[in-house]
Amino acid sequence: MRQHQVGKTHTGKLGNGTKASAPLGYKTIIRPSKAATRRHLAEIGRVIASRKAAPQEGLIRDLNPMVRGWANYYSTVSSKETFSTLDHKVFVKLYRWAKGATRRRTLTGQPEDTGTKEASGGVSRRATG
């Protein structure tokens, strides 16, 4: 929560019930704290790291309530910049997860059988003749 100095037309008024309410000259803007943002991002990172081998559907099912709940909690305050920053950071984490998942699937798959000794584990399958 922070007080920002603003002009007389964008300010709140001192609502003490008098007829001539004086402009305050400040506007209170509430934003998610940096600590709360870091905690949320760390929790998302832990979920992504713990589900490296999980299918995409399972990861989305686990992350969706966390992201939605956090966004709904902070939706009433001025958090556009925070949401934008978190969106980018979560995208980067998920992109790295996807790149790693693709690499893991490629590495654990069976080698392509080209008829050479390396692909067949040292035994030549090429027809001799």
Image: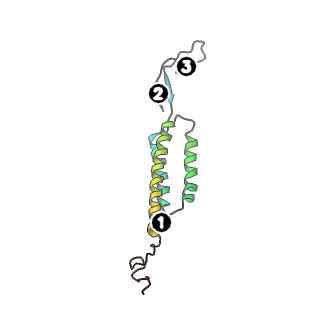
The colour scheme used to paint the residues is: rainbow
Q: In the image, is 71 to the left or to the right of 127?
A: right
Q: Quadrant of residue 120?
A: bottom left
Classify mark 1: helix, strand or loop.
Answer: helix
How far apart, in angstroms, are the residues tagged by discs 2 and 3? 15 Å
Classify mark 3: helix, strand or loop.
Answer: loop
Q: Quadrant of residue 112?
A: bottom left
At horizontal 48% and vertical 39% (from top left) the residue drawn is: 82
How far apart, in angstroms, are the residues tagged by discs 2 and 1? 52 Å
Per the image, the residue denoted by label 3 is 14
Classify mark 2: helix, strand or loop.
Answer: strand
The amino acid type found where label 3 is placed reads Leu
As drawn, the label of residue 3 is: 2
The amino acid type found where label 1 is placed reads Arg
The amino acid type found where label 2 is placed reads Gln
At horizontal 50% and vertical 19% (from top left) the residue drawn is: 24
Direction front: furthest residue: 129
Q: Quadrant of residue 58?
A: bottom right
Q: Nearer the viewer, residue 125 or 100?
A: 125
The image position of residue 98, as x and y in percent, is 48, 57
Q: Kindly report which numbered mark, 2 or 1, lies closer to the viewer in this rendering.
A: 1
As drawn, the label of residue 113 is: none
At horizontal 40% and vertical 78% (from top left) the residue drawn is: 116
How far apart, in angstroms, are the residues tagged by discs 3 and 1? 63 Å
Label 2 vs 3, first from the N-terminus: 2
As drawn, the label of residue 105 is: 1
Q: Is residue 4 above or below residue 121?
A: above
Label 2 vs 1, first from the N-terminus: 2
